[in-house]
């Protein structure tokens, strides 16, 4: 639990030192320290390991993304709620190639924990829909697919959704 708030504590220390610099008429140092204090605050809300893993997934390098996620010790204790949702989301994406059962549980955890972006929720529901289709659960797959279609406002997943709808007709 302490690790979660260590970054905020460091930011508070830097901000207090910048206040001391302002009091001592060292305005330039104070401004610089305020800018430096933004980094621990940013990394409190955006874990650097998860950012690196997202970057690796975008580059289709799942091995390196998995290595980044493996370096996070005790994710339930060290990550805040939003980070934990993306941790589960990335784990679900990576395991969707090999272990569907694990991938499904990770995607469900990610959705229940709370993915922030609608596009990510749409992708998770689309993945869950595909997994339900492999289990021959047509109703559940249809419900998840319509939810994914509603969440995909920008139409980035429209081709994949259409493909899944065509495959659903065969079931």
Image: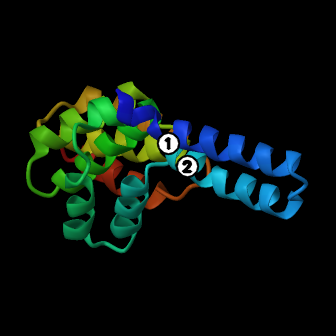
Viewer-closest of 124 and 168: 124
**In this rendering, is residue 69 above or below 62?**
above
Viewer-closest of 84 and 171: 84
- For disc 1, the marked residue is 7
Q: Secondary structure at mark 2?
A: helix
> Which color scheme did the rendering employ for the protein?
rainbow
Percent position (x, y) of residue 27?
Answer: 88, 58
User: Few, some or many C-alpha atoms within 10 Å of disc 1 (few <14, some 14-19, many ≥20)?
Assistant: some
Please tell me which residue is depicted at 37% across the width and 29% down the height of the picture. Answer: 2
Percent position (x, y) of residue 144?
Answer: 36, 33
**In this rendering, is residue 56 above or below 148?**
below
Please tell me which residue is depicted at 63% across the width and 38% down the height of the picture. Answer: 12
Would you say 76 lies left or right of 99 here?
A: right
Q: Quadrant of residue 75?
A: top left
Would you say 20 lies left or right of 101 here?
A: right
Please tell me which residue is depicted at 91% across the width and 54% down the height of the picture. Answer: 25
- For disc 2, the marked residue is 40
**Quadrant housing the C terminus:** top left
Viewer-closest of 36 and 69: 36
Please tell me which residue is depicted at 23% across the width and 66% down the height of the picture. Answer: 62
């Amino acid at each position: 639990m302490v690790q979660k708030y260590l970054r905020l504590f460091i930011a508070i220390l830097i901000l207090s030192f910048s206040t001391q610099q302002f009091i001592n008429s060292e305005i330039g140092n104070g401004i610089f320290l305020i800018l430096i204090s933004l980094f621990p605050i940013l990394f409190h809300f955006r874990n650097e390991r998860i950012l690196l893993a997202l970057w690796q997934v975008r580059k289709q390098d799942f091995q390196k993304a998995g290595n980044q996620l493996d370096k996070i010790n005790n994710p339930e204790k060290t990550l805040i709620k939003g980070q934990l949702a993306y941790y589960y989301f990335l784990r679900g994406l990576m395991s969707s190639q090999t272990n569907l059962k694990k991938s499904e549980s990770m995607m469900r955890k990610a959705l229940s924990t709370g993915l922030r972006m609608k596009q990510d929720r749409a992708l998770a529901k689309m993945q869950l829909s595909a997994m339900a289709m492999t289990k021959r659960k047509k109703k559940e797959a249809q419900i998840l697919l319509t939810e994914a279609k509603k969440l995909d406002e920008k139409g980035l997943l429209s081709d994949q959704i259409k493909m899944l709808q065509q495959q659903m007709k065969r079931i």
